[in-house]
Amino acid sequence: MAIKFEVTKECKKTKARLGKLFTPHGTIETPVFMPVGTQATVKAMSPQELEKAGIKIILSNSYHLYLRPGHNLIAQAGGLHKFMGWGGALLTDSGGFQVFSLGKLNKVNDEGVFFNSHLDGSKHFISPEKAMEIQIALGSDIAMAFDECIPYPSGRYQAEVAAWRTVRWAKRCQEAHPDDGGQSLFGIVQGGVFRDLRIESARKLVEMDFLGYGIGGLSVGEPKSLMYEVLDYTVPCLPADKPRYLMGVGAPQSILEGVVRGVDMFDCVLPTRNGRNGSLFTSSGKLTITNAKFKDDFTPLDQHCQCYTCQKFTRAYLHHLYRAKEMLGPILGTIHNLYFMSNLMEGIKLALRKDRLLEFKEEFLANFQS
Amino acid sequence: MAIKFEVTKECKKTKARLGKLFTPHGTIETPVFMPVGTQATVKAMSPQELEKAGIKIILSNSYHLYLRPGHNLIAQAGGLHKFMGWGGALLTDSGGFQVFSLGKLNKVNDEGVFFNSHLDGSKHFISPEKAMEIQIALGSDIAMAFDECIPYPSGRYQAEVAAWRTVRWAKRCQEAHPDDGGQSLFGIVQGGVFRDLRIESARKLVEMDFLGYGIGGLSVGEPKSLMYEVLDYTVPCLPADKPRYLMGVGAPQSILEGVVRGVDMFDCVLPTRNGRNGSLFTSSGKLTITNAKFKDDFTPLDQHCQCYTCQKFTRAYLHHLYRAKEMLGPILGTIHNLYFMSNLMEGIKLALRKDRLLEFKEEFLANFQS
């Protein structure tokens, strides 16, 4: 079956909404944060740990899986869910972002992108059709159209070329995608920070009638205020009955700002990367656990948190693990940061239910120092 | 309470025995394999994963904890069990082996060992009294006497000096150890590969009446047959009603050979280190999961194994994780290897109960290619 999306409640004071995303691998309440499992694993986490952290959907990267172990191998394994032992829902990106940020670009034209692998320098070509072939092989629940991602800052001309190319590619993705019900395809709105490009890009994609819409090309270096501004005028161009996904955004503050602007889905490597680096989220903000002051701090990481890390260990022990470069540090840090994100999303949903989202946002941001 | 040890069954055809080791942190059936948690963590494993792998006792290293985070900090935390969130039993080594193998030695005399830290080159001195102070601070269930470890090969003179020094140090450890019931002290037999030294060393230590006896200085480069020979004449010198601990030995074959020679306890970094490196134990032997032939092997690592890794994932996925240098590889590999070791020990105990230890050993070794 294709995904279905249902808005279950709309916020009266903001554009935020509660929703349900029905996928072949479970129903997900939105707004939702999706951890990133770049190479068919959310770093440091087993599937059972993800479940314990309340995670119901993760993102995986087509670019990485195409290069290693190869999408055909994963198809042979019975698809990505089976390959990585993940029973929840999966969204795959198209590879667009990674091709532009990690690969060594050789040529980009309307045909597609010629690039060298960041692993071994080998030559590759990804077109919209190839991006569909890869994601179909992976068998994710949600596939993303292939898009051209531009850096920030980019001039208007570059943004315009990329936006219209992304629209043309979206059409080709749609044509190459069987839409046989097992996997649902989302379009991606580009257009940089140019209001008219974003609006026109959204309009053209909406005409194609995708099952959901990604907002791409944000959180690529622009000031946060500018990102929020883009959301202010882009989100209203997207249909109310389809999920809206702000790609690559996952800082707690940005999630709250996205939610009040009507975004339903988020993904980011930040909570897991931070977890590995010892930058840990607490109700009073981010904390660098390797700081000397935590050496003999025998209190829990976050006394309000119910995760395994906070229930069983102290800051002093975590400090020791990270200082001694023990794997258990990143493991416990990731468990905690993901639990924190799930908990944040639960808080947002509860506040939406109780018609106090803005109050929740204000309280959260007053305490959370990043 | 001090530990208590009870031999519950003796093998009729070998010197092997079944036993129960009662500790302040649980009762352990012997023969037992103890994984090594060098820096207050068994690498890649959380305490809950250790429990799931059937682990009831682990070893931790005084030398490492003395240097980082410091034994006094761990005492402040309420002891090592509490610091690392481990509810099972703990044995600490004395630091002797590590001082000689990792530290940069400056001077060894009867007083103790002057050395430089392998971490930062800082100068340190560990005496038998200091080794007791450290282990008392750590609060392990079983502490080991401070011993002088010699490499293989060593001449008779060197072995003799070290053996008698270790005996004198054992006496000083006993005097420095409060023996107040919370922690039990084991002596360590040294003597290299010299029969008379081993026997005389054992005799002198037994006179001191320790609660258990380590056999040290083996598995340091000598041929396996020589190690078994040393066990053949050393173990009979140790009292039947006290636990016998073969230090630093943990290869499946060596455990079986140790068990039939009357050893009750084993420890080794091998299963965990191998797990991290992708050298994984199966019922048919060790397997190097990074080998190309496993790239598209969609069978479980070991079809007879009930561990999480074997129940949920394929060799192809594990191959991918190790190749992509994903932390989940070492995590799943360690989970499996420790489960394998627990399973081996269960097999040994069951065979002992059923009076078929030698048959079990023969069957196991016929299948297990290392």
Image (cartoon, coloured by chain):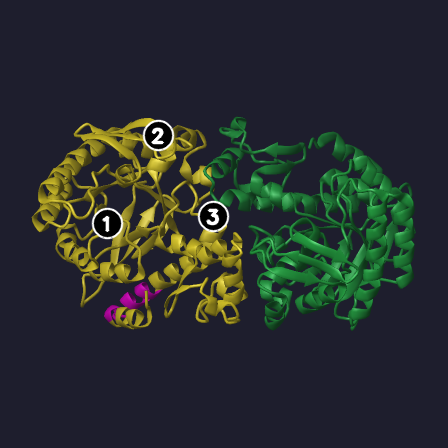
Chain colours: A green, B yellow
Task: Name above or below for residue A272 compared with residue B79.
Answer: below
Name which residue lies at 61% across and 38% down. A280
| Tag 1 secondary structure | loop
Task: Name above or below for residue A330 compared with residue A20.
Answer: above
Quadrant the C terminus of chain B occupies? bottom left
Judging by the rendered image, the residue that carries numbered circle 2 is B121
Give the chain letter at badge 2. Answer: B
Judging by the rendered image, the residue that carries numbered circle 1 is B220
Instruction: Tell whether B135 sits left or right of A370.
Output: left
Quadrant the N terminus of chain B occupies? top left
At label 1, which amino acid type do we have?
A: Val
Q: Count the marks: how many?
A: 3
Give the chain letter at badge 3. Answer: B
Name which residue lies at 76% across and 59% down. A146
Residue B360 lies in the magenta-colored region:
no
Q: Residue A45 appears at what percent x and percent y?
A: 57, 52
Instruction: Tell whether A307 sits left or right of B325.
Output: right
